[in-house]
Image (spheres, helix red, strand yellow):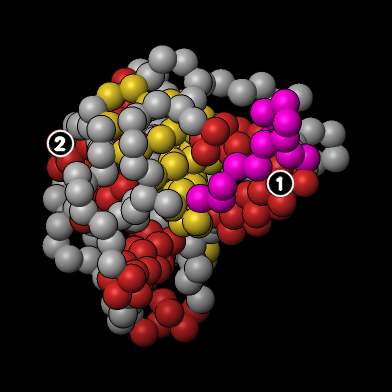
Amino acid sequence: MTTFVETFSGQHDRERVLSDILRRRTGAPGTTLIAHVERGSLAVVGVHELPTPTPLLDDQHNFGGAHVGQLSEVLREVAHALVPERTWDGHRGGEMTGELVTVVCREGPASISPLELQYWWGWRYSNHLTQAFHGDVYVVTPEGWAALLGEWRGRTPALPTGERQQPSQRPVIDAEGILSDAATALLAPRPRECLLCYVLRMIDEFGCSCTLRFARHYRDVRAPRAAGLERRLGSKGGSCDCEIFLNGYDLRTQFKVRESPSERATGDPPEDPFDLWVDDDELRWPDDPPACLGVRAGSTRPCGLWCASGR
């Protein structure tokens, strides 16, 4: 059985994640934002927006069973759209890598109301079986924010005071959200993917810009506390993404392939700058790099495919 461990360590973590969520989607009163947050780095992986339903209470001021059931179905679909399904090895489930954070955007005081409470019960019975826990529920208003669990609250982030989104603005905002989600998905590191495997995959797809843009992006979303990453890569000759491999790191011998006799006979240099040859033992990088061996969350160290280069 997987035990839930608190993702956020304090006020700063909560304010940072809430700000990132609202930066991704402009929360308007009457909407709720469901965000997939990576537990290791606190990076916001994706955000889904839905209208906030009016909570239905019975005579004893409890949430109606049918209403909670309908809300649970909606939340289950949102979870499946944001987070991969949890893996199983026949005995136990795979690692829980994310958390689903609910942010209710509305007018009024920044205090918990039935609007937020209904999501707690909706998530409880959602049974979404993804790789993310359903976490805390927050409210954000022009007066600030508050959390359902604990006494966490603050003045920022907050919704803009007195500003209402006009219906004509919604298509533009929705399109921006779609583009933002697509870009995030395209550039997102894969689960447990190491820094080097990620950078190599991005270079193969988009090329090198003569900067450490992909290495920095990995650091920002996976290991924001790794402030010395550029210095460490630079000490190995990696002043840009491609130089990480040209000067700093190489595939270990057991993951290379032996070059063919025709390749040795021509003596021509490879067209691909990453198709590095090792003349002494006639080995080279494979055409398709092997799958990343994985690293722990929050690490910027290379996986077991890589070793420091002798060049």
Q: Nearer the viewer, residue 264 or 124?
A: 124
58 within the magenta span: yes
Horizontal and vertical percent position of residue 207: 27, 70
**Residue 104 visible to an observer of this rendering:** yes
Q: Is residue 33 magenta?
A: no
Residue 244 in the image: x percent, y percent? Answer: 25, 51
Locate residue 247 relative to residue 262 in the image: left or right.
left
Image: magenta residue range: 52-65
Image coordinates of residue 101 in percent, x first then y, are 49, 38
Please tell me whether mark 1 sits on a helix, a strand or a loop: helix
Looking at the rendered structure, the kind of residue marked 2 is Arg
Q: Which mark is residue 92?
A: none
Question: What residue is drawn where x is 15% and y is 36%?
Answer: 231
SS for dot 2 = helix
Residue at image position (49%, 78%) is 261
Which amino acid does the dot numbered 1 rest on?
His
Residue bearing the label numbered 2 = 231
| Most common secondary structure along the magenta stretch | loop
Residue identified by numbered label 1: 67
Above or below for 302 versus 27: above
Instruction: State left or right for residue 276 relative to residue 193.
Output: left
Residue at 74% in and 39% down: 64
Q: Residues within 10 Å of mark 2 (few under 14, many from 20)?
A: few
Q: Is residue 112 above or below residue 270?
A: above
